[in-house]
Image (cartoon, helix red, strand yellow):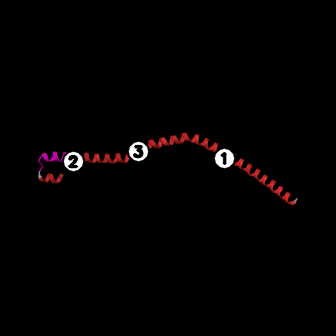
Amino acid sequence: IEVKEKLSIKTSDEKQYAIYIQQYLDELDQQFEHLQQQLDSDKKNLSQLTDNIEHQLDEFIQNYRLVPYTMKSDYQLARFDYEYQDQLLERQFLQLQPTDQQVEFFI
């Protein structure tokens, strides 16, 4: 009789533990569903903001990524123009048939 009582107590304890664990798992599922809904809602709200930020970044990159190259090419073009103008002035000066002193002074 004692063995049967112990087995029945053990069986009823196991059932209670199983019920407790199932209730706990159900609570976790509810929390998970709530958090999933909140995440989905936040994603919807942030998607517009994220798209806007991405568009602004793309625009910034398109507008300003070429600035260093543009500056370098502008510098080289200005330098070329300066050297060209310098050569023209020197040739005009030499066409005037300057004296040796004038050539030393200006060139």
Callout 1 secondary element: helix
* Real-space CA distance between mark 2 and mark 1, rounded to the nearest whole angstrom: 77 Å
Q: Nearer the viewer, residue 67 or 88?
A: 67
What's under tag 2, amino acid-wise?
Asp
* Real-space CA distance between mark 3 and mark 2, rounded to the nearest whole angstrom: 33 Å
Nearest-to-viewer mark from 1 and 3: 1
Q: Tell me which residue sits at (61%, 44%) in the image.
A: 39
Q: Quickly name the residue at label 3.
A: 64
Callout 3 secondary element: helix
Q: Quickly name the residue at label 2.
A: 86
Callout 2 secondary element: helix
Decide if residue 95 is on the left or right side of residue 85: left
The magenta segment is: 86-98
**Residue 84: within the magenta?**
no
Q: Nearer the viewer, residue 32 or 6?
A: 6
Residue neighbourhood size for the residue with mark 2, other residues' Cα within 10 Å, grouped as few (<14), some (14–19), many (≥20)? few
Q: Tell me which residue sits at (31%, 48%) in the image.
A: 75
Residue 32 — which label?
1
* Real-space CA distance between mark 1 and mark 3, rounded to the nearest whole angstrom: 45 Å
Q: Is residue 67 above or below residue 11?
A: above
What's under tag 3, amino acid-wise?
Tyr
User: Do labels 2 and 1 touch, CB within 8 Å?
Assistant: no
Q: Nearer the viewer, residue 22 or 1?
A: 1
